Structure formats: structure tokens, C-alpha cells
Amino acid sequence: MGAGRDILIVDDNEVVTDVLVDLFRKEGYDSAGVASGEECLEELRRAGYKLVMLDVRLPGIGGIEVLRAIADDHPWTDVIIMTSHVSLETAVQALRLGAQDYLFKPFDDLEMVVATVNRALERRRLLEAHDHLVRTLTELAIENTRIMAELRSANSDLEEKVAQRTAEISKANLQQKAIIAELREAKEAAEAANRAKSQFLANMSHEIRTPMNGVLGMAELLLHTELNQKQRGYVEMLHQSGESLLGIINDILNISKIEAGKLEIEKIPFDLHETVRGAVELYHEVGRRKGVAVELHIAADVPRRALGDPNRLRQVLLNIVNNGLKFTEKGSVQVRASLVEKSGNGHYVGFEVRDTGIGIPPEAMPTIFELFTQVDGSTTRKYGGTGLGLAIAKQLVELMGGEIGVESEPGRGSVFTFIVYLHAPPEAATEDEDLPIELENPLEDPPCQARFDARVLLAEDNPVNCEVAHAMMTALGCQVDVAQNGSQAVSALARKAYDLVFMDCQMPELDGYEATRAIREQERGSGRHTPIIALTAHAMAGSRECCLSAGMDDFLSKPFNLAQLQELIERWTTT
């Protein structure tokens, strides 16, 4: 529909042609002029025009004939008829043959001529836009038809794939449900096994600790009587053997607590220097008897006061020093403490335990910190041990935010190193820095026995443990009454006031928990609260909490020694 140029003027009057060409060029149109019909048709064949302004009277071929030729050969070219004397019927005929408009000469109003041309060209532009739109819509319709066909085909394929995938997912879901059911059963079985293991350990702890309390308690009481040198030696060996057995029991319980995630690290202010010194000094006498020097060096920059768990840190040191001393026949075991770095609101403190013992073979190094691991069977037979000490040390070090490692050479000794993170204590805790703190030390001699004028009720069904506790309390100056079960304990408190009650947790008729609840119920509204201390051979996680939730005030785990008993009586009879 497009043409090369804008307007072609066809008029045999040269003046009219020149005026119109000049007029339209000024309007911005590409215009040209010819004087005859033949020239018009030739120009249209050569260049093509959007609009022809055609005079009706022309020499040669007349305007009407030229109009017919344009309609046949150049249908996309618009025509405006120009005439000065032809009748209106001729103009109508020209319009029917395809002319868009007509103008009468002479042109009195050139603006009207320009407006007529503009209108014709605007109509042409709109028709071209319309045609373009129609073509575009047609192309879009064709493309849409193609796309819809492709979509129908793709949808058919997709439905087939979805059906196939749905079948696969259904099958996978069935398999997953079966696996989940198996995992659930395995989980329940594992939990049941873990509960059974925990219950077994709790029961075994109770059953072993109960007679151990009698063995250690009686041995300790015997050590406080008049004995000759040989008798004292026998009793000391008995007591040390009992302490060793108790250590093994505690190691097994510690491992159980760690595996269950129930072993918590305390964060209390303590004297780091005294904690380390106290742990190492326990082995001075052992080393002296073996002929092995036990040495300690604490670097000057190691902070004295810290915030952490002194007993767990002490336990790590005891396990590693004991391990080094056990495998060292001559030479020394050296312990060094140093400040690694300050970090945040605390310090990383490093420890090194170097011995001159038998060393560790390279093939045993990767498993040295695993549970129940010994270098070999002959080592176990010769040196003894359960293989738990280093495994517990590793777990405790990691719980304290550190790491542990070892270097060793067979025949030359081993070097164990570990780092722990200790928080800086509050400012108030740094005062009186040079004052040592008391440490738990089961191998030290008990402090001077205090005398308590206290009325104590002892509820204990085991005859041996009853005899041990009664003798210890009497030795401390207490007036002791005995109840052999929970019911007797409740009745005794209903008849008489006591300063302190030591309550065994497992007793016939009424256990310690129910007896305590009954005593608290008796005391309700009376304004009286008798301190009740739990005596239990249970040492598993949660034992203390069970006692406190039943209404007891404190907790003493069997076996216990005279110093521990004295500390508890002093605490609860002076408050």
C-alpha cells in the first residue's frame, strides 16, 4: 500500500501546476507536477505516489480515463479530481471510479486545498494503519493457532508425564512410609535400649554404691580408731581400693551422662592456681613411692581468678596426670599451665602433661581418646584401667570450649596438651585474690572434726549403711535417732522436733520421696520447716532434681565420707 512519493499534480496549466507543487512542498510534502495523462501514468509506473491531484480536462488521454487506469494499475494511489466547468454528475462519476474528493478551480482558498489534501492523506494513513493492524492480528491469530496446537501437544505429553510421575511419587511415598515406619521402630527400639541402659546403670549404681558406702564408711571410721602400724596399713589399702572402685563407677556414670547430653559445666568463680596445684599435689606421694618426680609449673601470666567449672577441670588434670604416672616407671611427670590468648571476656588457658613413660605406638594414636581403649591387651594386664579416663577428659575439655591432643614416641614418653576457655570473673570476685579456696580432695586427711549439738533423725533401712552413718554422726557430736522406713520417719517427726533429717530414698513401706511429701504436709501451717537431706546411692542425671522436687533441701550421694557429712551438718544447723 505504500508509495515512493507524496503528491503528483496533473494539470496542463503550467501556472496551476507550479503553484500547487510549491504550496505542498512548503507544507513538507514531496511533490511533483506533469502536464498530461500519459506523463501521469508513466510517472506512477516509475516512482509511485500516495496522492494524485488530477485535472479532468487534459490533452490526449482525458482525466476520467486516467482515473480508470489508476484504479486498475495503481489501486493504492488516491486521487483528487480538479475541475473548473464540468458538471456535478462528472464529479460524482469520478468519485464512483475511485476518486477520494474533488476541487473546483480556480482555487480561491488555498488553505481549503491544503486541508482537502491533508484529509485525503490522513485517511490514507489511517487505512494503512488499519491494514497493518489487520495483518498483525492475522499473523497473531496464525501464531496463536500454532502455539495452541503446540500447547495441546505439550499438554498431552505433560499429562502423560504427570501421570507417570504421580505413579512414581506414589510408589516412592509408599517406600518412604515403610522406611519411616522402620526408622520409627528403630528409634523406639534405640530409645527403649537407651532407657534400659540408663535404668540398668542407675540400678547398678545404687546396688554397688550401697555396699561401697558400708566399705568406705567403715574403713574411714576404723582409721579414726587406735590401730597398730600393720593394722592401719591394711585399713588404708582397703580404703584406697574402695576409692579406686568408686572412681571406676564414677567414670562409667560420667560417660553415661555425657552420652545422654545431661552433664552440665558449671560457671562459678574459683582460684585457678589452687585448683591446678591441688590436683597435681594429690600425686606427689604416689610419685614419691614409685620414684617418679611429679612437677608443676604455672606461668606468671596465667590469671589466678577465673569463672568456670573447677571440679571438671580438676577431673581432666587428675585423669591425664594419673595416666602419665601409671605408665611411667622412672623419670618424671611434668605439668605446665600457660596463657594461650585472651579472647572476648575470658582466656584460653593451655595445659601440658609430659611424662617419660612407655609412650604410645603410632597405630594406637588415632583411637587413644576413644571409649574403653587401651594400647594393647598386655598393657591392660600390666597397668590395669578401664580405658575411660582419656575419653572422659576429651569430652570434658570439649564441653569447656577447648580441644585436646597428644604427641608420643614409644620408649620416650608422651605429651598430652589441652586448652580450655575460662571466663573472666566479675570485678568483685577479683578481690582477695591471694586467698585460696577450698577444693574437693577425697585423698586429703579430713579437717578437724567439729562437734555439733544437733538432734538428727536418720531414716535408713540398710543395716550396714545405718551403722556407718550413725557412727559418723555420733562421732560429730550429734544425737541420732534411727527410723528403718519412711513411715517410721513420718511418725518420729510427728512426735518430736529434729534439727536435721537424713532420708534414704529407697526404703520399704514408704520411700524417702513419699515420706518427705508427708512430712511437708504435716508441717503445712505450722511455720516449721525441718531440713531434709537426701541420702541416695543413685548418681545418675536427674537424681538430685527428683529429690528437690519431692521437698528435700539437699542431696548427699553414697558413698560419702566424714568430711562431706560434717560440711552438710554445719551448713544446715548454722542457718
Image: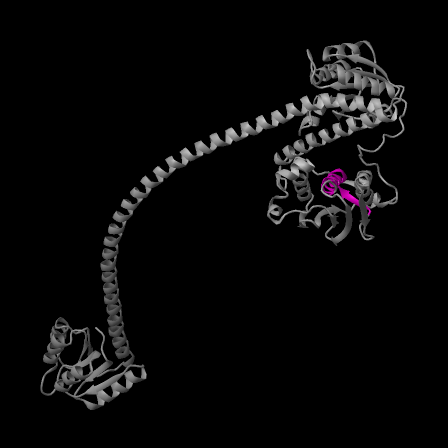
Magenta segment: 304-324
- Residue pictured at 72% horizontal, 47% vertical: 421
Q: Nearer the viewer, residue 434 or 27?
A: 434
Instruction: Note whether 307 is above or below 228 in the view shown.
Output: below
Residue 112 appears in the rendering: yes
The x and y percentages for residue 461 are: 73, 14
Res 78 quadrant in image: bottom left
Q: Main secondary structure of the magenta part?
A: helix
Question: How far across and down, in percent of the image, does residue 202 sit?
Answer: 64, 25
Q: Residue 328 falls in which quadrant of the image?
A: top right
Q: Is residue 451 above or below residue 140?
A: above
Q: Is residue 557 magenta?
A: no
Does 307 lie within the magenta span? yes
Q: Which quadrant of the figure contains the N terminus?
A: bottom left
Viewer-nearest residue: 108 or 101: 101
Q: Position of residue 449 (x, y in %)?
A: 89, 26
| Placement of 57 over or under 572, stated as above or below | below
Q: Is residue 15 left or right of residue 295?
A: left
Return the residue nearer the eye: 354 or 88: 354
On the question of residue 552 being in view, the answer is no
Residue 467 in picture, x, y percent from top left: 79, 16
Query: For residue 247, which quarter of the picture?
Result: top right
**Position of the C terminus by quadrant:** top right
